[in-house]
Image (tube, helix red, strand yellow):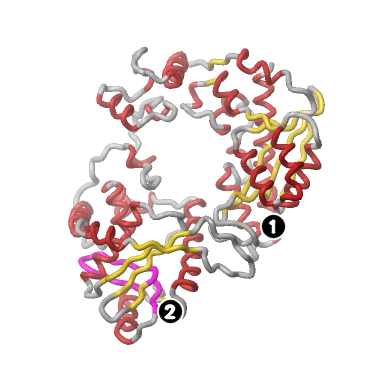
């Protein structure tokens, strides 16, 4: 069977030939999660803005009638017009590519590759190199290549004006230098696809530069119970050294081999099979007065801002949950969630200030909530004093947990999702209705405020969001209870 490559498949092959083989021969195993689909939608939106502002008045080459027709349309446009072409389609040596923007010129073409990231990455250069190699081979020489990426300093002025959202960077030299390797890649990967599945062990390449969707397939049936990845923040160098020494399970590493105290602590506790709790390191938590507040935020990060005065990828809070303990044993819950599609920041801040009043510790898990409050201080200067006073009351439980508690099943992580099943196994995120993590919460918010979402679906998303955020703050209550019993 003759196989055809695309630029995305070549990038998969560069990351791991086994991934490429699986994408072609085991495509039924390939499932896109909601986060991947959301990134695709963001890419389409950014691409539309690039066409409008960087190369207006062009023609779009669709795939409605197949690649053959797209190739024909591209040739006709290039031969008869100097208008920009969006998604121009080319083929050479069994590689087919669709180029975001092509600008025809008398002596050759200019390519603009559009990405929704805020900087040019190495794999973007690979992408451009593959495309320019195909265009060159198809008899359409490329003279100049630009990357268009999002300018994170852009502030949206409103009224649909996205002039300045994208900045361009000339990558011609880097792409041309990389282009010399493309022919070798193509030959290697076409050969790979004709052969049995490559025998490649799992490693760092499984997550870099992209998370591989086939990790479950590739994981050995007799995988170690506590692999080396369970060592927190373990370096690639140390992991490779341990593998070369014959260790793939941290329980087999001898005492004294690990020089990092935290690594040795995790190894020792994992070997014991039991949790370690040092209550003396959390005694100060017990001294905090009442009322006590347990707070969690959810935020949206939009590549393309929709609210005046906001920036790309700015963390914009739309929901908070707060459990309030007025005295021992007495817990109540308050919440805020804005799904109107209007800017939620002021309502978020005002309601939060009203509920948290002026005294009492505000427990959070990590630095995220404090960072968001500081962002609100910049965005809402009239509330700056009150918000700063609120921030001054924040107590981060994560450093306390790191110091005083570890369970082998946390597997090197002190995240809330890792710690909670060990401390409060009855609180199960997987049992929640539809939303189980922060990424899903962001996508649920985006869907809920979208114009085409039905009232019934919006209500379903509201229930999922409130249940998820409430679980987060109930988890904080249980953590404090366990730290101070």
User: Which residue is tagged 2?
Assistant: 58
Q: Which residues are magenta?
A: 84-101
Residue drawn at (19%, 50%), measured in percent from left and top?
195
Residue visible at 58% across and 42% down in the picture: 436
Q: Toward the viewer: 120 or 320? A: 120
In the image, is residue 182 above or below residue 59?
A: above
102 lies left or right of 197:
right
Image quadrant in which you'd find residue 106: bottom left
Q: Earlier in the sequence, mark 2 or mark 1?
A: 2
Q: Residues within 10 Å of mark 1 (few under 14, many from 20)?
A: some
The x and y percentages for residue 379 are 67, 51
- Quarter of the image where the N terminus is located: bottom left
Q: Residue at x 23, y 73 (%)?
A: 138
Residue 125 vertical placement versus 400 (above, below)? below
Contact flag, marks 2 and 1 (Cβ < 8 Å):
no
> Residue tagged by mark 1?
343
Residue 240: image location, x then y, percent: 29, 29
Query: As displayed, is residue 285 above or below residue 350?
Result: above
Q: Position of residue 340 (x, y in %)?
A: 71, 58
Is residue 277 visible to us here?
A: yes
- Magenta stretch mostly in which secondary structure? strand
Instruction: Determine if the magenta segment contains residue 96.
Output: yes
Query: Circle 1 — which element?
Result: loop
Image point 79% across, 34% down: which residue?
332
């Amino acid at each position: 069977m003759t196989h055809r490559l695309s630029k995305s498949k070549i990038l998969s092959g560069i990351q791991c030939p086994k991934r490429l083989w699986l994408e072609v021969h085991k495509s039924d195993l390939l499932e896109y999660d909601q986060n991947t689909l959301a990134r695709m939608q963001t890419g389409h939106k950014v691409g539309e803005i690039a066409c409008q502002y960087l190369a207006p008045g062009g023609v779009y080459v669709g795939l409605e009638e197949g690649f053959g027709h797209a190739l024909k349309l591209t040739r006709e446009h290039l031969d008869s017009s100097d208008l920009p072409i969006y998604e121009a389609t080319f083929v050479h040596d069994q590689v087919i590519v669709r180029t975001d923007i092509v600008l025809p010129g008398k002596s050759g073409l200019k390519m603009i590759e559009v990405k929704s990231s805020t900087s040019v990455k190495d794999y973007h250069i690979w992408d451009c190199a593959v495309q320019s190699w195909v265009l060159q081979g198809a008899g359409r020489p490329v003279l100049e290549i630009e990357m268009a990426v999002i300018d994170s300093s852009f502030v949206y002025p409103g009224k649909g004006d996205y002039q300045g959202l994208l900045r361009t960077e000339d990558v011609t030299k880097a792409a041309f230098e990389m282009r010399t390797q493309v022919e070798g890649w193509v030959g290697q990967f076409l050969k790979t696809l004709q052969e049995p599945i490559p025998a490649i062990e799992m490693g760092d390449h499984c997550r870099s530069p992209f998370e591989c969707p086939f990790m479950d397939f590739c994981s050995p049936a007799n995988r170690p119970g506590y692999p080396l990845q369970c060592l927190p923040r373990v370096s690639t160098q140390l992991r490779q050294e341990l593998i070369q020494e014959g260790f793939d399970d941290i329980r087999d590493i001898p005492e004294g081999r690990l020089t990092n105290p935290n690594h040795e602590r995790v190894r020792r506790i994992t070997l014991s099979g039991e949790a370690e709790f040092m209550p003396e390191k959390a005694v100060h938590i017990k001294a905090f007065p009442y009322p006590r507040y347990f707070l969690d935020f959810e935020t949206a990060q939009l590549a393309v801002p929709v609210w005046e005065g906001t920036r790309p990828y700015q963390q914009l809070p739309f929901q908070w949950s707060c459990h309030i303990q007025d005295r021992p044993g007495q817990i109540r819950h308050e919440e805020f969630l804005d799904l109107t599609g209007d800017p939620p920041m002021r309502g978020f801040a005002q309601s939060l200030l009203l509920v948290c009043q002026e005294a009492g510790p505000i427990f959070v898990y990590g630095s995220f909530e404090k960072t968001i409050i500081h962002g609100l201080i910049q965005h809402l200067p009239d509330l700056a004093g009150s918000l700063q006073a609120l921030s001054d009351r924040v107590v981060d439980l994560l450093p306390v947990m790191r110091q005083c508690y570890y369970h082998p099943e946390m597997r090197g992580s002190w995240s809330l999702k890792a710690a909670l099943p060990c401390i409060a196994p009855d609180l199960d995120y997987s049992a929640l209705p539809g939303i189980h993590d922060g990424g899903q919460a962001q996508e649920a918010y985006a869907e809920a405020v979208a114009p085409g979402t039905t009232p019934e679906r919006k209500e379903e998303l509201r229930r999922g969001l409130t249940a998820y955020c409430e679980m987060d703050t109930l988890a904080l209550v249980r953590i404090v209870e366990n730290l101070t019993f």
